[in-house]
Structure formats: C-alpha cells, structure tokens
C-alpha cells in the first residue's frame, strides 16, 4: 500500500508539472481554485528506518516474536543445564518442599497447642521417619518370607509356558524351545559386564544418595520451622510495587501444593487399601508389599497406578494362574475408575484441577529431563505454576486483610476490616 501511495503521488506530481508547464505556455486556462496540498508522509512510530516501514507489519510482528522466543528458549536451556549440574542439591530441595507441604498442617496443629516451633517440627519429622521406617521394615520382611514360594511358582510358570509352546498353537519343537532358552542365556552372559558395571556405578552413588537424604531431612526441618520467614525474605528482594502480587501468588501456590500433596496421599492410601484387600481376598502373595507399591505409584498420576497394577497382575498370574490374574486386573481397573471419576474430583476439587493432557505432557517431559524424580515433581510443579501465573496475571492483586494504608503525609489511614492488629 505504501508503494501504491508513492506511485500515485509521483503520478500526481508529474500531472501537476505538466499542467504547470502547459499553463505557462498558455495552453491551459487558469483554474478558479487552488490545487490541493500533497498528502503528508506517513510516519511509523514503531519502526526505526524507512526500510522497516517497507516491511509488512505481519512479518515485523512475527520477527519480533521470533527473536524474543529465541531469547526465552536460550535462557530456559541455560537454566535447565544449571539445574542438571546442581541436581544433587535441587532434587533433595524439591522433595523437601513436598514433604513440608504434607507435614505442615501437623506442625501448625502443634503450634496452636503453644508448643515451641523447633520442638513441634522435630516431633513431626521424627514421627514421619518412624512411619516410613516401619512400613519399609514390614514390606521387606514380607518380601523375604514369600520370595522362595514365589520363585518356585515362577519356575512352574516357566515350565507351563514351555509346555504351551510345544502343545499350543505355535507347535514348537523341543529343539526350538531349547534354542530360545539358550539364546536368552547367551544374552544374559553377553550383557553380564554391562550389568556389573551398572551395579558398580550404582554402588558408587550410595554416598550421593546418603548426602541427598541428609539434605532432605535438614531442608524439611528448616522449611517447616522457618518457611514463612524464608518466603518473606525472598519477597523483600522484589520491588515494593510488586511485593503484594508476589506474596499473594506465593501464598496461593503454596496452598495449591499443600492441597495437591495431601489429596494425593489420601487417594494413594485409598488405592492401596482397595487393591491390597483384593489381593488378600484372592490369596495373592505379597499383598502388603504390592499395596505399598500401589501407594508409591499413585504419586505419579495415570502412569504410576497402571505400572503398579500391572505388577500385581503379573504376580497373580505367576502364583495363581490366569483366572485369578483376570480378577486382579478387574479389581485394579475398578479402583482406577473410582479414583479418576470420584476420588480425584471430590478430594482435589477445582483448586488443583489440571487437564489430563497437561498431566501426560508434564510427566513425559519430567521423565525425559530427570527420570523418576522428574515424573514425581512434574505434576505438582505444573499445579503450582498454574496457580501462580493466574494470580500474577490479575490486574489488581488482593490487598492483605492486615495491610495498613499509609497516606502521603505519613499517617495511617486505617486497616482492613476484621484485622486484629
């Protein structure tokens, strides 16, 4: 359009010049009205030069978005690499935040009983450690007691598979079955060095795991005792005009994290009880260890429950046969349907409602970036970011109920209604 205007302007000036020349020669009479003044040149305030003005606006907007997205991507990549370099510290801190959100209400209840903050935090932390240690001890003892029986049943299951391969629809010969078994043994022997090196590397990381556990304990203790003070210190680092918005978004995000963790624990406990009762009724071995596995797997939404349920079905298939395995599969599907359609909406509610597509994408990205820990942290991180961004995007943040409005003269104009200060 700019070029069309310029061409029209050139044509108009050329026509005027011809008329002026003809008028000087007397060929054209003088008109009764003065000619119009030329149109003013359009100035593009969003451009720096005439060349930018010649570029179409959609292309300029796309280019502006592109280089900004490139900058954001580079900064995000650098941040991910930094987190990967200090993952030994970041992962324990993330786990400590989850534990603090879970144990925070218990500490608050003890504080309302006029108990010192350090003592209340210590009692809650010791009680949590005792519960975890007792559960692990019971799981390990049951697993050790039932392992010989499960090994015998697994051997019998392998023999049944061999008989089915010979007499079933495959009609494999004894030589073919033996060849398949020999191939499996050769694969194990050829990969023994890799398995051994993996075990050695895993043993070499025991010190890092122990360091991470100690850091989790210390970080959880101080988060529970001084979390509010730490958050206020972080808020004071921002400009004054942004502090109320940051504080409001932080409080809402922490409430969302606490609601998510507590609801997940409750849902996981109900899943474990339901599937554990089904395993106990059907006389499947390791009912308590499998229920504990279901409990732990429920912390990874959608994926964890499916994997832990598949393990329970596999154990039932090896020990009791395909009929009991189908019954266990039905119990697992029933519990998962109850969880997805009743427990999740009822317990979590709208405070931490996340679309299933966002959950799947978050878990996939977490697994790629940080393995099991990434899958565990992905969904609560998405929930916290969702709440925080929604609060920050509001035009007018809510004023805290105990905020004092100070006039320009320095005098207090009053406090919000209901404030006791």
Image (cartoon, rainbow, N blue to C red):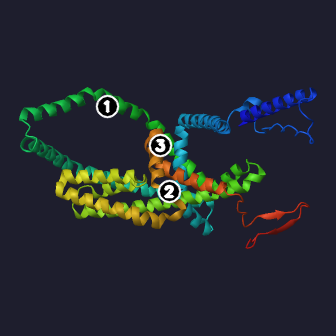
| Camera sees residue 18 | yes
Badge 3: residue crowd in 10 Å (few <14, some 14–19, many ≥20): some
Q: CA distance from mark 3 to mark 1?
A: 27 Å
Which residue occupies the foreground of this view, 20 or 358? 20
Q: Which element carries disc 2, helix, strand or loop? A: loop
Tell me residue 223's x, y (percent).
Answer: 60, 53
Q: Are marks 3 and 2 in contact (CB under 8 Å)?
A: no
Work out whether 48 lies above or below 229. above
Left or right: residue 291 compared with residue 207 = left
The residue that label 2 is drawn on is 354
The residue that label 3 is drawn on is 365
Left or right: residue 25 compared with residue 261 = right
Q: Which element carries disc 1, helix, strand or loop? A: helix
Q: Nearer the viewer, mark 2 or mark 1?
A: 2
The residue that label 1 is drawn on is 195
Query: From the image, which quarter does the C terminus lie in?
Result: bottom right
Q: Residue at x 48, y 47 (%)?
A: 362
Q: Which element carries disc 3, helix, strand or loop? A: helix
Q: CA distance from mark 3 to mark 2?
A: 16 Å
Give the image quarter of residue 1.
top right
Q: Are marks 3 and 1 in contact (CB under 8 Å)?
A: no
Badge 2: residue crowd in 10 Å (few <14, some 14–19, many ≥20): some
Furthest residue to the bottom?
418
Tell me residue 82's x, y (percent).
Answer: 58, 35
Please report whichever mark, 3 or 2, sits nearer to the chain's N-terminal start.
2
Tell me residue 124's x, y (percent).
Answer: 52, 59
Work out whether 78 lies above or below 240. above
Q: Which mark is residue 285?
A: none
């Amino acid at each position: 359009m700019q070029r069309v205007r310029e061409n029209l302007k050139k044509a108009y000036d050329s026509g005027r010049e011809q008329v002026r020349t003809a008028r000087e020669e007397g060929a054209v009479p003088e008109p009764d009205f003065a000619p119009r003044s030329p149109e003013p040149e359009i100035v593009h305030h969003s451009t720096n030069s005439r060349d930018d003005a010649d570029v179409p606006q959609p292309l300029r907007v796309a280019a502006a978005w592109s280089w900004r997205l490139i900058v954001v991507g580079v900064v995000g990549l650098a941040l991910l690499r930094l987190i990967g370099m200090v993952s030994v510290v970041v992962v324990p801190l993330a786990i400590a935040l989850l534990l603090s959100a879970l144990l925070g209400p218990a500490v608050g209840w003890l504080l309302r009983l006029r108990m010192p903050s350090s003592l209340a935090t210590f009692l809650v932390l010791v009680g949590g450690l005792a519960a975890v240690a007792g559960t692990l001890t019971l799981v390990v003892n049951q697993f050790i007691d039932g392992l010989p029986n499960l090994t015998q049943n697994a051997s019998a299951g392998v023999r049944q598979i061999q008989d089915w391969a010979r007499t079933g629809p495959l009609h494999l010969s004894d030589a073919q079955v033996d060849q398949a078994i020999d191939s499996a043994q050769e694969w194990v022997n050829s990969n023994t060095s890799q398995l051994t090196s993996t075990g050695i590397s895993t043993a070499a990381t025991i010190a890092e795991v122990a360091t991470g556990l100690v850091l989790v304990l210390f970080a959880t203790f101080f988060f529970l005792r001084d979390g509010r003070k730490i958050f206020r210190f972080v808020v004071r680092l921002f400009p004054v005009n942004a502090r109320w918005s940051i504080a409001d978004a932080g409080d809402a995000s922490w409430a969302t994290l606490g609601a998510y963790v507590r609801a997940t624990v409750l849902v996981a406990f109900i899943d474990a009880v339901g599937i554990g009762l089904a395993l106990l009724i059907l006389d499947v071995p390791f009912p308590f260890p499998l229920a504990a596995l279901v409990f732990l797997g429920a912390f990874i939404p959608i994926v964890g429950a499916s994997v832990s349920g598949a393990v329970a079905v596999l154990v039932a298939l090896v020990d009791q046969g395909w009929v009991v395995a189908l019954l266990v599969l039905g119990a697992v599907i029933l519990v998962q349907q109850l969880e997805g359609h009743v427990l999740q909406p009822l317990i979590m509610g709208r405070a931490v409602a996340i679309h299933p597509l966002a959950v799947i994408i978050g878990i996939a990205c977490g697994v790629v970036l940080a393995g099991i820990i990434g899958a565990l942290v992905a969904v609560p991180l998405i929930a916290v970011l969702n709440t925080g961004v929604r609060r920050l995007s509001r035009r007018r943040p809510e004023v805290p109920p105990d905020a004092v409005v100070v006039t320009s003269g320095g005098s207090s104009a009053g406090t919000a209604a209901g404030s006791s200060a």
